[in-house]
């Protein structure tokens, strides 16, 4: 990449470019009221089978008591709020790439979906979602009746 050749320090130009993007994103977000892209944790969504889904969020350095998961009216909210003063400690840091800002993510849940389990493991928050469709709402086949009698041929 051409930007890497502009500085003697490896990755310096990338860091400057990313920092400028983050500052522009925060400014735009303040003007529009939206959450900056860089302040949201990365996540994966996976369909396990017909009724089970897995949501995984990257939350390195977060503790269980700093994370909250709740469902309200068909929406899943996952938020993180720091309890310590680590975010205000900028002494001695050259570069801080691990996000430490409070966040709130929201997902629309499909009808009849419930969060069945949540687990924090090695910086990843795993949320299991189960969708149970009632029998009355499952698709079913309807037999077609033949009202005309069959014509028999006698030989």
Image (cartoon, grey):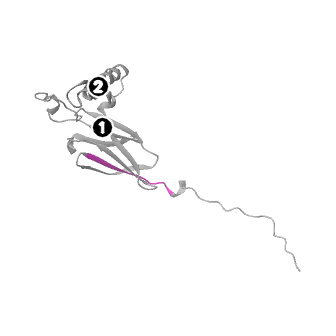
Task: Check the picture and name the quadrant holding the C terminus.
Answer: bottom right
Q: How many angstroms separate mark 2 from mark 1 (CA)? A: 20 Å
Q: Main secondary structure of the magenta part?
A: strand
Residue placed under numbered mark 1 in the picture: 41
Tags 2 and 1 touching, CB below 8 Å: no
The residue segment tinted magenta is: 124-134
> Label 1's element?
loop
> Label 2's element?
helix
Q: Is residue 132 above or below residue 61?
A: below
Residue placed under numbered mark 2 in the picture: 17
Q: Nearer the viewer, residue 5 or 31?
A: 5
Where's residue 28, x and y in %? 35, 21
| Residue 143 found in image quarter | bottom right
Where's residue 34, x and y in %? 36, 26
Determine whether, in the image, residue 122 is placed left or right of residue 85.
right
Q: Residue at 20% across / 43% down in the picture?
A: 63
Q: Residue at 27% across / 41% down in the picture?
A: 68
Q: Nearer the viewer, residue 96 or 49?
A: 96
Q: Which mark is residue 123?
A: none
Task: Check the picture and name the quadrant holding the N terminus.
Answer: top left
Residue furthest toward the right? 155
> Is residue 127 on the magenta stretch?
yes
Report the mark closest to the observer, 2 or 1.
2
Q: Residue at 23% across / 25% down in the picture?
A: 7
């Amino acid at each position: 990449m051409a930007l890497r050749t502009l500085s003697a320090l490896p990755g310096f130009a990338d860091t400057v470019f990313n920092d400028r993007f983050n500052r522009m994103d925060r400014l735009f977000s303040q003007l529009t009221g939206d959450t900056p892209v860089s302040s949201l944790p990365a996540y994966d969504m996976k369909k396990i089978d017909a009724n089970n889904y897995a949501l995984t969020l990257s939350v390195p350095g977060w503790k269980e008591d700093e994370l909250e998961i709740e469902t309200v009216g068909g929406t899943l909210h996952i938020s993180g709020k720091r309890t310590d003063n680590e975010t205000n400690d900028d002494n001695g840091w050259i570069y801080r790439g691990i996000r430490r800002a409070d966040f709130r993510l929201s997902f629309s849940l499909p009808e009849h979906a419930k969060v069945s389990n949540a687990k924090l493991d090695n910086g990843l928050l795993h949320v299991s979602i189960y969708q149970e469709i009632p029998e009355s709402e499952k698709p079913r086949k309807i037999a077609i009746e033949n009202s005309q009698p069959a014509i028999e041929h006698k030989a």
